[in-house]
Image (tube, rainbow, N blue to C red):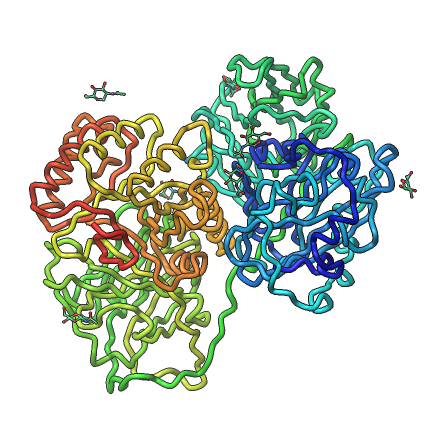
Amino acid sequence: MLLDRHLVTGLVGLWSASKTYAACSSNLLIDNFTTWINGVNNLDWPNGDDGSMTAIAGSAGQVVFIPKDENSYFYESFECQQPVTNGYGAIQFTLQGPAGGSFAFELQTTERCNNYNGSYGSSYNIVSDLTGQRQTVTLPLEGFDNDPNYDAVVGLVWSTFSQNGVQWSVGNITFVCGSGSGSQVTTTVPTRSTVLPATTTRRSTVLSTATRSTISPVVTSQPATCSNLLIDDWESQSRLTFLGYNAMGQASSDDRTMSSIIVSGRRVMLNPKDADSYFYSQFGCLNAANRYGGISFRIRAARGTSFAVTLGYAQTCGATNDQTVTLTTAQLKWTFDGTERLYSFPFSAFTGVDTTKLTVINFSNFNAAAVFGPMFFYCGSTASEYTIPSTSPTSPPVTRSTTAAPAPAPAKVLVIDSFASSGTNALGEWHGADEGGMTLTFGNNVMTIRTNDSDLAWYTQLTNQCADLRSYAGGYLHIAYSGSNKFSVALQQHNVQCNPDIKPYPETWDSLEAARYGTATDIYMPLNHFNVNLTRAIGFALKGFYSTEPTTFSKIEIVPSLPSGWKLPTKLASGNLVFACTRPNSFAFAIDDGDPKYAQRVMDIINQADIPVTFFTVGLPLLDKSNGLADMYKEMAARGHQIALHSYTHPKMEGLPDTAAIDWEYNNDIGAVRQVFGDGIIHTNYFRPPFGTEGARMRQRLAAALQDANPYIVQWSIDVEDWIWAESDTPVKQLDAFKRDLAMGGNLLVMHYLYNSTVELLPEFIRLARATGKTLMRVDQCMGDPKAPPL
Ligand SMILES: *[C@@H]1O[C@H](CO)[C@@H](O)[C@H](O)[C@H]1NC(C)=O
Ligand SMILES: *[C@@H]1O[C@H](CO)[C@@H](O)[C@H](O)[C@H]1NC(C)=O
Ligand SMILES: *[C@@H]1O[C@H](CO)[C@@H](O)[C@H](O)[C@H]1NC(C)=O
Ligand SMILES: *[C@@H]1O[C@H](CO)[C@@H](O)[C@H](O)[C@H]1NC(C)=O
Ligand SMILES: *[C@@H]1O[C@H](CO)[C@@H](O)[C@H](O)[C@H]1NC(C)=O
Ligand SMILES: *[C@@H]1O[C@H](CO)[C@@H](O)[C@H](O)[C@H]1NC(C)=O
Ligand SMILES: *[C@@H]1O[C@H](CO)[C@@H](O)[C@H](O)[C@H]1NC(C)=O
C-alpha cells in the first residue's frame, strides 16, 4: 500500500504534529450503502457511477463494481463538508481490488463552503500496491495535489482503476476524527512499509477532469453529481417476466393481465389483452425531492394509442396503502405517430403527489400495444435521454493459428450424416431431435433446423452403444452448412456401462461454438478439442441454437486433415459438465431456489434430517431484502451447507443473444453472492444452468467469469419432475419420478421448492435416498472435490 503523496511529507507523527484539530466526538459515516437502492448515500446525497461501469451493485456495507475502461468511476457527493473545522483529519474506507492494483482517489473541493455554487476543483492521491484482500484505506487530508482547501469538501471519486473487467469493492466510507492514524483508528491503518519512490506512481498529471465530462462542474441548484436514476433498462427478459424485478431490484409486473410482455434490445413491448391490462414498476419509497424532476423514457406506439399513467406515493414509508394520482396520455399531451420519441413528465404535473415518498408507476387502460425504452428519474428540471452504457466487446477475439494435427491422423473419412433420410444417418444409425419445438425440414440431401428454444438439440448417433473414436483422435469433425452459425456442436460420452438404461446417460459431453470454428460454409473442429473420453462416444449433437434464423446442413463427417491454409481457433476452457456424483456410494440433494414462502419449511426438513445439501440460489432474489432468503442462506451456509450459483435472473443462458448478456448474468450473480456472503467466505465454482440449458458460450463465459478453467456445471440424474406434476391432480407422481430415476442409478437430484406438494414430499425423498445405503452429502463432496469440506 502506498499513499505517494503522503509519503513525501514523511512520518505520520510528524505530519500530525503540524496540525491541530478541533474536538471531534464521532466519525461521520458518508456511505455504508444501506440506501443504495434509493440512489443516495447515508448523507442522503447522490452516489453512483453514471453508467460508467460494466456492472455495479450496492448492498449493506459496500458497493461492488466492475470498471469498464479508463473512464469508469464511482463517486460520492454530499453537502459541502468542513472536516478541519469539525476535527476530521482523514477519509477512511475499506477496499478490495486486485492484488498489486492501484486506483486514483479524487477529493473534490470548493473555495468555501458558504458560497458553494456547484463549481469545484479536483485533487488526487494514487493508492497502489493493494493486497488483493479487503483492506482499510486511511487517507489523511494532507498532501493531495493542487493544494486544495481541506475545509470545503464536496465530493469523492474513485477512478483510474489499474484493472478493468474485474471486481472491485469500496465499503464503509467515513470521515474519521483526528489524523486517522491516532488512537481511534490505529489498528486499521494499512502498513506503509513497502515504500516506492513517490515519482514512480505519481499519475496526477495523466488525470484530467476533461475525460470525465459527465461530472465536470455544473452550475445549477442540483448537486453537481446528480445522475439519472434508472427504473428499468429492460436488460433482461427473465428478470422482468420470470422473476418480476426492475433494474432497481423492486417489483415490476403485469400480474398476468397483459397478453404478452416482450423484452428485446433494451425495449419492452406491452401487448394489452383488454382494458383491464396494466403494468407497474415499483421504486421502494424513493425521495426524489430537490433531486429528480420527473420521469422520462422513449415510447413507440401507433397513432391513436392512449393509456393512463398512475403515480403512487406512501404517506409513511412501509405503509401498504399507496395514495395515487392518475393522468391520461391526453392529459399529459402525449400523442403517438408510430415512431419512437422521448416522452417525459415532471412530478409537478401530478398534483398532490408527495415526491419524498414515491412508490410506483403504473400504466393501465391501454387501447393498443406500446413499446417503452429505458425508464428513469431525470435530474433537475429538464428531461433528458438515458444513455445506455456501451457494452463490452460481444465476443472474445478468435485467435486462429495453423496447428499441425497433433495425434496420428486417421487414414480414412467417416461419413456420419448426409441427410438422405429423415430417420437414419449415413451409418444407418438414428438421428433426430428433442421433442417440443425444433422444426426439421429435409430436402435433397440437406436438412434445415429452425428453433426458438436454446434448450433443444438434434442428434446423430455413431452407435446405440459405445463407439470407440480413438483411431480418429487426430482428425476433425467437418460440418458443411449454410445459414446461421449461432449454435453449438457437442460430442456426447456414454456411461461406463455403455448402457442407456443406466443413469447418467449420456455421462457428459463437451460443446464447441460453431461460429468460432467455421466459415460461412464449413466447420472444422479437432476431435481432441472435445473434452470427452473417445472410447465411449455416442454421437454428435447440434444444440444451443440462440437465433431463430435457420441453418441448413448437408454433411457431417470426420476427416483426416484440414483444407490447406485453414486456421483453427484455440480451445477455450469449457468446464466440467456433470450429471452424477462420482464418489463411490454418494448421493447429493441439490436444491434450486423456489418460492421464499416455502424456504423455512425446506430448511427445517433438512435440519431435521441432518444432511448436508447444496443450494443453487438465484442472485437477484438473494439481494431482495424483503424476502428473507439472504439471511436464511447465511444461516444454512453457517451450518455447513453448500451455496452455489444459479444465475442472476434465471434465463436460459445459452439462449441469450450475445456474450455481453451472458457476462452480465454471471458477473451480477457472482457479485450478489459476494455481497450477501462476504468476500472470501463463499467462493464457489459450482453453477447450475437454469432449465439445464447448456451450450458452448455459456460454458466458456462461466470459466472466464470465475477465472477457473474447470468450474462445475451441475445437471442432475434424478428429476422429481416438480415442473410437470407438482400442480397437477397427481402430485404424487413426483415420488414415482424420483423412484424411477433412483432405480436407474441416479444419485444427484434436482428439485425446486416452488410448490407445497414438492416440499411435503422432501422427507420421503430423503428417506428413500438413505434407504439405498448411500451417504447423503453436498455436491462438491460427492464430486470428490479436494476443496470440499471433509464429510
Ligand atoms: C449503516 O449506517 C447506519 C447509520 O447511518 C446504521 O444504522 C446501520 O446499522 C449501518 N449498516 C451497516 C450494515 O453497517
Ligand atoms: C462495514 O461496517 C460494518 C459495521 O462496522 C461491518 O460489519 C462490515 O463488515 C463493513 N463492511 C465493509 C465491506 O467494509
Ligand atoms: C462559482 O464559484 C467559483 C469560485 O468558487 C467562481 O470561480 C465561479 O466563477 C463561480 N461560478 C458562477 C457561475 O458563479
Ligand atoms: C396497477 O393498476 C391496476 C389497475 O388500476 C391495479 O389493479 C393494480 O393493483 C395496480 N398495481 C400496483 C402495484 O399499483
Ligand atoms: C417458440 O415456438 C413455439 C412453436 O412455434 C411457440 O409455441 C412458442 O411460443 C415459441 N416460444 C417463444 C419463446 O417464442
Ligand atoms: C475412458 O473410458 C474407458 C472405458 O470406460 C476407461 O477405461 C478409461 O480409463 C477412460 N479414460 C479416462 C481418461 O478417463
Ligand atoms: C402443504 O401441504 C400440507 C400437507 O398436505 C398441509 O398440511 C399444509 O397446510 C400445506 N401448506 C400450505 C402452505 O399450503
Above or below residue 189? Residue 70 is below
Q: Quadrant of the N terminus?
A: bottom right
Nearer the observer, 544 or 68: 68
On screen, residue 559 versus residue 584, left or right, reads: right
- Where residue 163 appears, as percent x and y from the top left, is 58, 61
Q: Determine the residue positioned at 41% across, 51% down.
A: 655
Q: Determine the residue positioned at 86% across, 38% down.
A: 112
- Where residue 728 appears, as percent x and y from the top left, is 21, 28
On screen, residue 450 versus residue 285, left or right, reads: left
Nearer the observer, 365 or 551: 365
Disc tally is 0
Q: Determine the residue positioned at 32% across, 56% down.
A: 712
Nearer the observer, 57 or 649: 57
Above or below residue 564? Residue 515 is above
Above or below residue 148? Residue 342 is above
Residue 312 picture quarter: top right
Above or below residue 471? Residue 447 is above
- Where residue 436 appears, as percent x and y from the top left, is 28, 45
On screen, residue 689 versus residue 85, left or right, reads: left
- Where residue 396 appears, as percent x and y from the top left, is 51, 65
Residue 156 picture quarter: top right
On screen, residue 686 versus residue 43, left or right, reads: left
Q: Determine the residue positioned at 42% across, 42% down.
A: 677
